[in-house]
Amino acid sequence: MNYEEIENRKKVSKEMEEKLLKTMKQKHLKRLSVAQYINDMQLTGKEKACLLGSMKNFEQLRRTYSFCGRENPRF
């Protein structure tokens, strides 16, 4: 992967994060599940993949996982 691809991915991640933050502010939410966001925004398959792939580069939002009491969660 070259420098341009890395920078492009960071740019896309930033755009996705800003879009998600904007949605959360409009709904006055502090937490929003990814599944709920995908449903609300009616994202296409490509947009879902872009969102999920860019989450690792989010700077302002942090990811949280709830495991529903399981000792060994599966992803």
Image: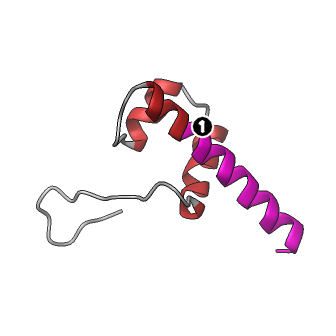
Q: Position of residue 53 (x, y in %)?
A: 60, 56
Q: Amino acid at mark 1?
A: Lys
Q: What residue did someone put label 1 on?
A: 19
Q: Position of residue 73 (x, y in %)?
A: 24, 66
Q: Is residue 27 above or below residue 5?
A: above
Query: By what rule are the colours in the image chosen?
Result: secondary structure
Q: Quadrant of residue 3?
A: bottom right
The residue drawn where x is 14% and y is 71% is 71
Residue 13 located left or right of residue 48: right
Viewer-nearest residue: 24 or 8: 24
The residue drawn where x is 30% and y is 65% is 74
The residue drawn where x is 40% and y is 58% is 63
Residue 16 located left or right of residue 39: right
Query: Bounds of the magenta span?
Result: 1-20
The residue drawn where x is 36% and y is 62% is 75
Label 1 element class: helix
Is 41 magenta? The answer is no
Is 11 magenta? The answer is yes
Classify 10 Å Cα crowding around label 1: few (below 14), some (14-19), many (20 and above).
few
